[in-house]
Image (tube, rainbow, N blue to C red):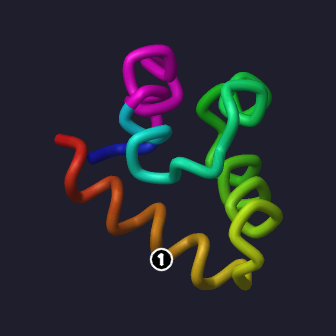
Amino acid sequence: MNWDRIEGNWKQFKGKAQQQWGNLTNDDLDVVQGKREELAGRLQTRYGIAKDEAERQIDDWLKRVQ
């Protein structure tokens, strides 16, 4: 899946992101607004993971949300 599609339809994908990463709050997801870098940063903060791990999780999620 193309990230541009996620960004353009963030309201639709927001719920799927919350299902995947339950520690992200609605406020977190509102701030993300479909921006991949912002999502990675929020994952790092909420889950205490490194940037490369956050990117890997986002890539895995992208494969599943088609």
Q: Element under label 1? A: helix
| Quadrant in which the C terminus appears | top left
Residue 31 picture quarter:
top right
Q: Position of residue 41 (x, y in %)?
A: 78, 59
- Residue hosting label 1: 56
Say which residue appears at 20% left-offset and 54% top-offset. 64
Magenta span includes 11: yes
Magenta span includes 17: no
Residue 52 left/right relative to 31 = left
Q: Residue furthest front?
A: 23
Say which residue appears at 69% left-offset and 35% top-offset. 25
Q: Position of residue 40 (x, y in %)?
A: 68, 60
Q: Position of residue 4 (x, y in %)?
A: 46, 34
Residue 28 left/right relative to 14 = right
Residue 59 left/right relative to 14 = left
Mark 1, other Cα within 10 Å: few <14 / some 14–19 / many ≥20: few
Q: Chief secondary structure of the magenta span?
A: helix
Residue 28 picture quarter:
top right
Say which residue appears at 67% left-offset and 49% top-offset. 39
Relative height, residue 54 to residue 42 (above, below): below
Q: Position of residue 8 (x, y in %)?
A: 48, 20
Say which residue appears at 41% left-offset and 51% top-offset. 20
In the rendered structure, which segment of residues is drawn in magenta? Answer: 4-15
Residue 1 left/right relative to 33 = left
Relative height, residue 21 to residue 51 (above, below): above
Count every numbered label the image shows and give the total: 1
For badge 1, the amino acid type reads Arg
Relative height, residue 21 to residue 31 (above, below): below
